[in-house]
Amino acid sequence: MVPHLVPRWPAWLFRWRTACTPPCTPGASMQQRTWAGASRTPGLGSPRGAVGTSPLDCRGSSSTSSRAPEVMLTQERYPVQRLPFSTVAEEDLAAFERIIPGRVITDPEELEASNVDWLRTVRGCSKVLLRPRTTEEVSHILRYCHERNLAVNPQGGNTGMVGGSVPVFDEIILSTALMNQVISFHSVSGILVCQAGCILEELSQYVEERDFIMPLDLGAKGSCHIGGNVATNAGGLRFLRYGSLRGTVLGLEVVLADGSVLNCLTSLRKDNTGYDLKQLFIGSEGTLGVITAVSIFCPPKPRAVNVAFLGCPGFAEVLQTFSTCKGMLGEILSAFEFMDAECMQLVGHHLGLASPVQESPFYVLIETSGSRAGHDAEKLTSFLEQVLGSGLVTDGTLATDQRRIKMLWALRERITEALSRDGCVYKYDVSLPVERIYDLVSDLRARLGPQAKHVVGYGHLGDGNLHLNVTAEAFSASLLGALEPYVYEWTAGQRGSVSAEHGLGFKKRDVLGYSKPPAALQLMQQLKALLDPKGILNPYKTLPARA
Ligand SMILES: O=C(O)CC[C@@H](O)C(=O)O
Ligand SMILES: [Zn+2]
């Protein structure tokens, strides 16, 4: 028995492994747990000073960097035409300087990180980054851009997966990084009101000190901004328990394309006064307005949290474990995540994270959050006895202290980071009927054969959300041809969603039709035209390119 074993758990339940006590993650400190933050560390980050040959030149800029392989310009890699927006001129820079003195960035080195997505797959060539601090400043900037017909790319932490957060051409980057103030927090209701640029992890710490938690959590928490989370309707790891941001966001303040401010920053749980306008902006990926402040409902901090990491012999057993779990853990279940054996191999190989359990075809991570440790322990013990006794689970480990809980979560949260170190990654984020989720992975593995290096499946099983990722040594058009439209057709055949939680951004906008009927697409175009008639807000994103 290892020293960390909490005595109330029967020792026979698991074969505890001393290898799992710290350090479980050789070569990977817990500070690196946010993959987006880690990707920005020296050596992994963006090349410096490699964009363009002249400050106003977007062409011929795929020069090589001595530090890291250059990311191809989006306009060179994809068949996309620049729309007839104006180009930033010296007098525009002077106008911005008057609105936000000292916060108009034109230095190419500083701009480089904001022009490239963190996955290093798309790259714009914006010449200017604006850093407003207030809603009023955002309003002045947008009013000016609207009049001048200048395109704007709103940007939060730039941790998106679908190329929505970086410019495609030379759109002005409007960063929320300096809009990072908490406006109010109510200790009875748990309602937090804050500016859009607050970093999720910092908000988590802020509310946890006050005995509450944020209703969402995700691997990118160390870098992502709450405004970006809302704009993309991020799902994440707490969705199973606390639901969508569509339920927990109570109000928004948004600056519209023409600079007018829509103040719907209410903090009411119930408000049935006509159309719920904030919903238009949740998940609109900055195409309908720029979110400047958020009012969000925070649940009370659970007093007892446990994480079980279990090995399952097959996917059928994963599903049965999930059913058993829902039945036996009920209201204390807060996450049910899964990953396949290839994911475990990748986190081991690239990040040095050791599996805490015997090698298995599948692994599940179950989190419980409740208010009485003894009650939760009792429930969890009977659940574990049941799944181990019936052979649904063959091995497992359990964490009740925060440090070990984080270690187990790292195995799941850092898969994305491991994949990005494996080579060129093709990402799919789909919603499917839960019983069919892994069939897509198996079918694709058989279809691709040796063309792919790895085909992995993991994700938020409790929410029916599969992250299907394929890696290869380098980008290959023939591999892409084998993946698409196959994955989208397969998903549409199950009436699934081609974007469960990552949004459409630039990369997935043309597959929207697999999940929405033509009438819905048309209405979306009409709403865009109504709110942003000049189309200056995050162009080339979310809506399919017009035929
Ligand atoms: O990288 C991915 O495909 C998924 C990222 C994220 O949504 C996760 O759940 O880890
Ligand atoms: Zn996810």
Image: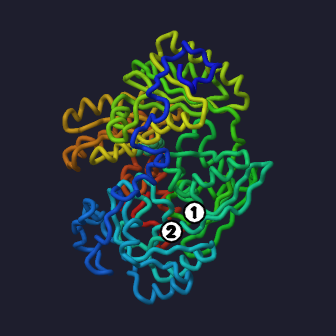
Crowd band around label 2 with a 10 angstrom C-alpha radius: few (<14), some (14–19), many (20+): many
Q: Residue at x 64, y 51 (%)?
A: 205
Drawn side of residue 323 relative to residue 276, left or right = left
Residue 203, above or below 94: above
Q: Residue at x 38, y 52 (%)?
A: 508
Element under label 2?
Answer: strand
Q: Residue at x 63, y 63 (%)?
A: 195
Q: In the image, which disc is placed on residue 139?
A: none
Whole-percent x, y for residue 454 in the image: 28, 36
Q: Name, please, the residue furthest toward the front.
A: 3
Say which amino acid is labelled 2: Ser
Whole-percent x, y for residue 174 in the image: 49, 71
Drawn side of residue 328 relative to residue 235, left or right = right
**Relative depth, front residue between 107 and 350:** 350
Q: Are marks 2 and 1 in contact (CB under 8 Å)?
A: yes
Total marks placed: 2
* Residue, disc 2: 175
Q: Name, please, the residue furthest toward the right.
A: 188
Q: Within the image, what quadrant is residue 237 found in?
A: top right
Question: Could you tell me if residue 340 is visible in this image?
Answer: yes
Whole-percent x, y for residue 101 in the image: 55, 83
Q: In the image, which disc is placed on residue 197?
A: 1
Say which amino acid is labelled 1: Gly
**Relative depth, front residue between 223 and 1:** 1
